[in-house]
Image (tube, grey):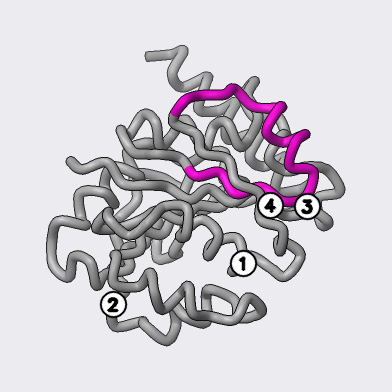
């Protein structure tokens, strides 16, 4: 299975949470570190970490690795699309696809990353937009086929990426997820508490095995 670059987004201000989401501890590790480790365990990378607000604080708060390529998006306040574009420029154009992953999904599993990576070698290949789905709900990460790179780079920073995904709906392929971790985004304190409970439940399940 070919290694694919992964753009991990950690540039936002976490205004709704009121605290830096990437550094919130979940199961004894920062949220962002858990996301990065899921890609590592799936054998994917390099990990292009897009930073913005409190960039130094976030970078210093996680375990470093030679597979991390940190970049700072000076236009992060314009929205997530500007960070995706910064990541795509850093990733280059040689890979058949590129992951795009928000850094606030602490329950992401390596199995889901691997399942998506396997699909890039199947039709529609570089034209596809592969999305994990759990019980009818689409989650993250996205795996963008290489044919979408230039179109996204040409987008206005103010246009949300989901508008592009909607426009290219015919290219979107849902891939069954191993579990609900693909839906574990945290924007509020209540969602953070839910992630903590789920992480603790997963740890207890492993202890029983």
Find the distance from the CA under tag 4 to the CA under tag 2: 28 Å
- Mark 4, residue position: 11
Q: Which residues are magenta?
A: 48-66
Kindly indicate whether the residue at mark 3 contacts the one at mark 1 (C-beta within 8 angstroms): no
Residue 201 vs 158, above or below: the answer is above
Answer whether residue 129 is magenta in the image.
no
Answer whether residue 53 is magenta in the image.
yes
Q: Residue at x 20, y 43 (%)?
A: 2
- Mark 2, residue position: 171
**Residue 190 x/y as whole percent:** 76, 48
**Residue 178 x/y as whole percent:** 34, 44
- Mark 3, residue position: 14
Find the distance from the CA under tag 2 to the CA under tag 1: 22 Å
Give the SS element for disc 4.
Answer: loop
Q: Is residue 29 left or right of residue 36?
A: right
Q: Quadrant of residue 80?
A: bottom right
Indicate which disc, 4 or 2, sits on the residue closer to the N terminus. Answer: 4
Which quadrant, please, contains the N terminus?
top left
- Residue 82 circle label: 1
Indicate which disc, 3 or 2, sits on the residue closer to the N terminus. Answer: 3
| Crowd band around label 2 with a 10 angstrom C-alpha radius: few (<14), some (14–19), many (20+) | some
């Amino acid at each position: 299975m070919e290694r694919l670059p992964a753009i991990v987004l950690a540039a936002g201000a976490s205004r709704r949470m009121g605290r830096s989401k990437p550094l919130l501890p979940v199961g004894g590790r920062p949220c962002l570190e858990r996301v990065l480790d899921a890609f590592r365990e799936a054998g994917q990378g390099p990990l292009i970490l897009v930073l913005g607000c409190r960039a130094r604080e976030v970078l210093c708060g996680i375990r470093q690795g030679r597979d991390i390529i940190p970049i700072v998006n000076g236009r992060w306040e314009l929205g997530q699309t500007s960070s995706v574009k910064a990541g795509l420029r850093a990733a280059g154009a040689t890979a058949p696809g590129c992951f795009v992953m928000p850094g606030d999904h602490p329950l992401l599993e390596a199995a889901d990353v691997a399942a998506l990576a396997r699909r890039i070698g199947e039709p529609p290949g570089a034209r596809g937009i592969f999305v994990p789905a759990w019980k009818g709900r689409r989650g993250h990460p996205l795996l963008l086929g290489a044919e979408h790179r230039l179109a996204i780079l040409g987008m206005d920073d103010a246009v949300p990426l989901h508008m592009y995904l909607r426009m290219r709906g015919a290219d979107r392929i849902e891939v069954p997820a191993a579990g609900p971790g693909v839906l574990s985004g945290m924007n509020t304190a209540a969602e953070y508490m839910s992630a903590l409970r789920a992480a603790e439940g997963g740890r207890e399940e492993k202890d029983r095995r």
